[in-house]
Amino acid sequence: MYAFDFERPTTLADAVAALSKDEAQALGGGQTLIPTLKQRLASPSALVSLTGIADMKGICTSDDGALCIGGGTTHATVAREAADSFPALSDLAGNIGDPAVRNRGTIGGSLANNDPAACYPSAALATAATLVTNSRSIGADDYFQGMFTTALEEGEIVTEVRFPIPEKAAYMKFEQPASRFAMVGVFMAKYTDGVRVAVTGASEEGVFRWTEAETALSANFSGDSLSGVSLSGEGMITDLHGSGDYRAHLVGVMTRRAVAAAR
Amino acid sequence: MSKVAMTVNGKSVSGDAKGNTLLVEFLREDLRLTGTHVGCDTSQCGACVVHVNGKAVKACTMFAAEADGAEVTTIEGMANADGSLNVIQQAFQDHHGLQCGFCTPGMVMSAAALLKENPKPTEAEVRDYLEGNICRCTGYHNIVKAIMAASGQDVGAIAAE
């Protein structure tokens, strides 16, 4: 790793101030950033750890029925505390990485990084979640802007994520067994006014909504309604683990499984 | 350099750490607690698992400064007060849950975290919890058996002999 200064503020205001310095970088749980630093793929002047900010941790339900999760909340905490209120999200969080990774990695860190194979972006997009930062609120449809790219400005921190709780939902991940990232992950969320389907792991553009499937499932919520709907392999990730066509096919399979498993 | 202070295996310790000093480096090189191993250094293998404030974490993927003020437990803190092996360690010995032993500190720390959360896990739950701990010798069967035995469950029916 290159050398850097390390700060661990205890308030959001101090963190924002620390991040205003040139080349300063926020550190969530570090489960992606620390390996990246070890490979010398990043050289921040300072790391600003967000793990000391108590206000950014925890889960609650808002008056309008949304599940609100602090940006510094670990995957393990979401898996445990969302189990009753939003089981699909709890399942997603409980299958990220491994138990030790889940004890460190945070929802805010995952969403800020927007890895094209990360799990959380699919949940945020499929539920039209709101990402709250230190300066504004951003709808998920505007937030995700391609692989590792988001609407966040330099030094902006995801402090909270608000998920409208669906009637039914499921997350289905086809796991790449070595990295435990999603080869393909599909988050399907059914609301009274329609179904949303978001796909991670598959596209070169990062997480995306599969609108044809949404239309079919909104008209008829059953796996059969997807029989005439398919996705092209064009623009899908091709690597040593699978071709674009293979991933496109998996998206259909995972979506059907999500419909069957929805609760 | 900045000062970091934490409680490791019940003792207050402090030292100087650079910003990029990993917790595992601090434990091994400053405190000379070399029971915590570095296998892959990429968060895959789990040989470096320790407990920070009661939670299993990979000490190769956390900075020492992040553990400032924390309670840390390493494999050196697992034996009974009289120095004898604790129930999990003894079960690993009894059930031949180690061969070369390199992964064992991480396996024992993960097992201890699992049994704290879930005192009577099923075989499937044990295997699931060990997802982030890699062993190249045993084929895992005897590790699973040891953890089931440590939880006080019958291990007669587990896995292949």
Image (spheres, rainbow, N blue to C red):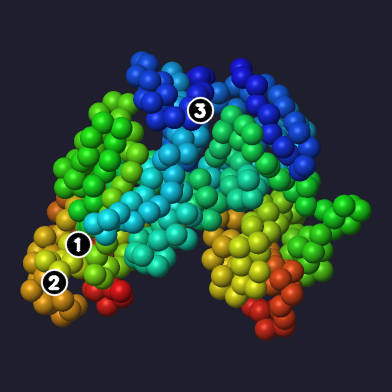
Q: Which mark is residue A217?
A: 2
Q: Do the residues labelled 1 and 2 touch (CB within 8 Å)?
A: yes
Crowding at mark 1 (Cα within 10 Å: few <14, some 14-19, many 20+): many
Q: Residue at x 41, y 40 (%)?
A: A56
Residue that badge 1 annotates: A197
Q: Is residue A246 left or right of residue B53?
A: left
Residue that badge 3 annotates: A8
Q: Which residue is drawn at 78% across and 37% down?
A: B11
Question: Where is residue A181 drawn, in percent x and y?
Answer: 39, 54
Question: Where is residue A204 drawn, in percent x and y?
Answer: 22, 47
Q: Do the residues labelled 2 and 3 touch (CB within 8 Å)?
A: no
Location of residue B160 (image quadrant)? bottom right
Say which amino acid is labelled 3: Arg
Residues flagged by tags 2 and 3 on a common chain: yes
Q: How far apart are marks 1 and 3 (CA)?
A: 38 Å
Q: Earlier in the sequence, mark 1 or mark 3?
A: 3
Q: Which of marks 2 and 3 is nearer the N terminus?
A: 3
Q: In which quarter of the image is the C terminus of chain A?
A: bottom left
Chain of the residue where label 2 is placed in the rendered structure: A
Say which amino acid is labelled 1: Val
Say which amino acid is labelled 2: Leu
